[in-house]
C-alpha cells in the first residue's frame, strides 16, 4: 500500500468513527425523547381521565340544579293547587248552603 492509500484509509476510519459516535448520540437522544413522549402520554391520559370526571361532575351538578328548581316549582305548584281546591270547596259549600 502506498502512503496515499494509508492516508485515505485513516481518513475513512476517522470519518466512520465520527459517524458511529453521531449514531450513538442520536440513539441516546431518541431513547430520551421516547421516554419524554411516554411521560407526556401518561399525563395526557391522566388529564383526559380528569376531564371525563369533571364532565360527569358538571353533568350531575346541572341535573341537581334542574331538580332543585323543579322541586321549588313543584312546591309552589302544590301550594297553588291546594289554594284552588280550597276555593272550589268553599264555592261548593256556598252552593250547597243555598
Image (cartoon, helix red, strand yellow):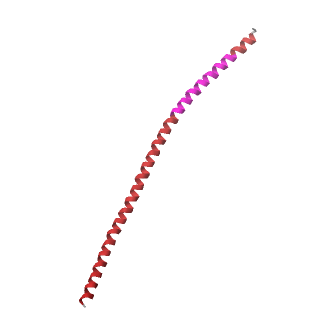
Residue 69 inside the magenta-drawn segment: no
- Residue 93 in the image: state x and y as whole percent: 25, 85
Q: Is residue 50 above or below residue 13?
A: below
**Residue 21, position as x, y percentages in the image:** 60, 22
| Residue extent of the magenta highlight | 11-35
Residue 30 lies in quadrant: top right
**Residue 43 rendering spot, x and y as whole percentages:** 47, 40
Residue farthest toward the top in the current orientation of the protein: 1
Q: Is residue 16 left or right of residue 49?
A: right
Asked if residue 18 is positioned above or below residue 74 in the image, the reply reads: above
Q: Quick one: quadrant of the C terminus? A: bottom left
Does 42 sit left or right of 68 as displayed?
A: right
Q: Residue furthest left?
A: 97
Rendering quarter of residue 6: top right
User: Is 29 within the magenta?
Assistant: yes
In the image: residue 27, left or right of residue 95: right
Q: Residue furthest front?
A: 96
Query: Measuring 31% from the left and 71% from the top, which residue is drawn there?
Result: 78
- Residue at image x 29%, y 77%? 83
- Front-most of 41 and 70? 70
> Viewer-proximal residue, 21 or 89?
89
Which residue is at 59% across, 27% downward? 26
User: What's the magenta bit mostly, secondary-structure-wise?
Assistant: helix
Pinpoint residue 97: horizontal percent, then vertical percent: 23, 89
**Image check: 3 left or right of 54?**
right
Q: Quadrant of the N terminus?
A: top right
Q: Give the residue displayed 27% in from the left and 81% down from the top.
A: 89
- Find residue 7 and report its image quarter: top right
Closer to the camera in the image, 81 or 46: 81
Amino acid at each position: 500500500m502506498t502512503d496515499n492509500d494509508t492516508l485515505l484509509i485513516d481518513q475513512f476510519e476517522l470519518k466512520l468513527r465520527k459517524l458511529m459516535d453521531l449514531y450513538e448520540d442520536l440513539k441516546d437522544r431518541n431513547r430520551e425523547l421516547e421516554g419524554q413522549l411516554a411521560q407526556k402520554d401518561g399525563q395526557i391520559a391522566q388529564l383526559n381521565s380528569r376531564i371525563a370526571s369533571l364532565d360527569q361532575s358538571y353533568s350531575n351538578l346541572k341535573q341537581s340544579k334542574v331538580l332543585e328548581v323543579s322541586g321549588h316549582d313543584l312546591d309552589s305548584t302544590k301550594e297553588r293547587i291546594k289554594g284552588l281546591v280550597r276555593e272550589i270547596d268553599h264555592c261548593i259549600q256556598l252552593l250547597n248552603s243555598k
